[in-house]
Amino acid sequence: MYLTSGAEATVKLEDGIIIKERVPKSYRVRELDERIRKERTKAEARLLSEARRAGVPTPVIYDIENSTIKMQYLDGTAMKYVIDEKLSEQIGILIADLHGAGIVHGDLTTSNLILFNDRVYMIDFGLSFFDSSTEARGVDVHVLFQTFESTHKDHEKLIEAFCRGYRQDFEQADEVLERVKDIEKRGRYA
Amino acid sequence: MKGTVLGIEGTAWNLSAAIVNENDVIAEVSDMYRPPTGGIHPREAAQHHAKYASYVVRGVLEEAKKNGVDASQIDAISFSQGPGLGACLRTVATAARMLAISLDVPLVGVNHCLAHVEVGRWKTPATDPVTLYVSGANSQVLAYRMGRYRVFGETLDIGLGNAFDKFARSAGLGHPGGPQIEQFARNAANYIPLPYVVKGMDLSFSGLSTAATEALKKHSMEDVCYSFQETAFAMVVEVTERALAHTGKNEVLLAGGVGANMRLREMLEIMCTERGASFYVPEKRFMGDNGAMIAYLGLLMYDSGNVIDVENSHVNPNFRPDEVDVTWLSEDLEEGRQRCI
């Protein structure tokens, strides 16, 4: 069963396991295509594990092969259906942990945060990268705020709660949240 | 849409004036700054523009007259307000202000990047595309969303054309580098791995250009040119595809001088076909910098009341396309369109 099919990869559920495969792109030369898919798959797996080491719950990886990752299926609920202020604050804490570990998720949406066994899990590290700059962190948070705004009525309260969590134990939090305002004004990454 | 607008382009090497109405380009006269060696020298380009400004303006007015449009019928003057080389922008802005005052018509300050997009929408069937704009100085992926053209991805350092030029200069090829690189690439035998730098939706070309230059020590010109092209184009096509997936749009428009490259077109065509999207390329005269695109966006803006006073017509060398409130597109363009989450 195919769960999603994005610009880069397909995700399917087979025998209770998630199989994420980066699909070949015929517009680029084969050598380059294989290199990119392999490198990114490896990087994604590494970022998933690094994130978990930093205290961010992520799916467990079972196997990596060329451009395919087999990982744990989280039979939970996407955050977009259940989010409230309490969860948003928890998300703030998680992302502070992630950013504190030098990782930027790159695609933070309420669909990539899953509530499973009463814990918030972060999935899809396909666009993630190592970066400790205020700009990259700011864009990360900005993208999440945008999904709040476009899908949740009480988004202001969710943002407030998020900031509470994000500030709790992260030294650079204020700097990042200040940058988020700048990024909003620029109107980028909309 | 009604009106006739005279527009002047001069952000870099090409000085070009054109007169358009909603139907077509009525007249266009250009004069290119051609450096004796190497790339653009900003001051000399500006001096060229100053020297030939009256020539292109007089020329375009004469040509329009032959085509039945008199100077008295011009409703507004538009000019490239940025982004571009400061000295060139100031020269062209001065010419535009003088014309607006002497003809007693409003002045329109145009964003150069958006002019590339709009002329493409005018001259191809594209209606609401993701635009890949690749030129010497600029490399951006743009799409319209909620009242503005948003930048979905862009270069973090130099433009793709500039990366080609830098490489060409150190490889002893002439300027501009793109056409010669394309020529050499046709006879290549091997792909050499070069740095592929896509960060999220953004691109970086300067390291690629340096690595290509280094690779020349060990590999043939043909193989290096080929690998440079393949790597750089794969990067921009990937970001364009991501923008398509992200916005849910189904058209791609190619703009800018690098768009002349046939391999780039082929790669975009393949990507679009596989995604079920349409791919559009305007004819060559509307791809590189041209006066018609400035006149046309000038017309759209004039028509929607988007004019400026001479006092507020400062140029902006770093003018971002996403700073511009799009007054000329109706909201129905994005009806039924929502961000896919």
Image: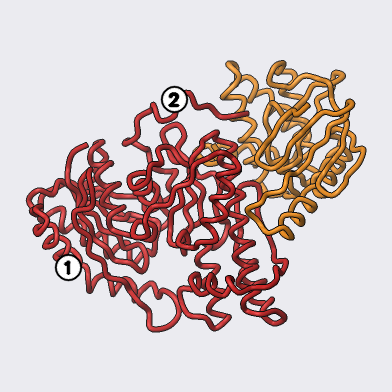
Chain colours: A orange, B red
Give the alpha-carbon distance from disc 2 to disc 1, as whole Å.
45 Å
Q: Amino acid at mark 2?
A: Glu
Crowding at dot 1, Cα within 10 Å, few <14 / some 14-19 / many 20+, comes out as few
> x and y percent of residue B101 in the render?
13, 53
Check disc 1 and report the residue beneath it: B54
Q: Residue furthest right?
A: A62
Task: Tell me the kind of residue under disc 1.
Answer: Ser
Residue bearing mark 2: B335
Q: Is residue B154 above or below residue A180?
A: below
A91 relative to B208, above or below: above
Q: Chain of mark 2?
A: B
Q: Position of residue A165 (x, y in %)?
A: 74, 28
Q: Earlier in the sequence, mark 2 or mark 1?
A: 1
Quadrant of res B208: bottom right
* Residue B223 location, quadrant: bottom right
Q: Are marks 2 and 1 on the same chain?
A: yes
Image position, residue A113 (x, y; %): 75, 27
The quadrant in which the C terminus of chain B is found is: top right
Label 1 element class = helix
Residue at the image point whose x is 38% and y is 42% from the top: B125
Q: What mark, if any, has residue A105 been given in the picture? A: none
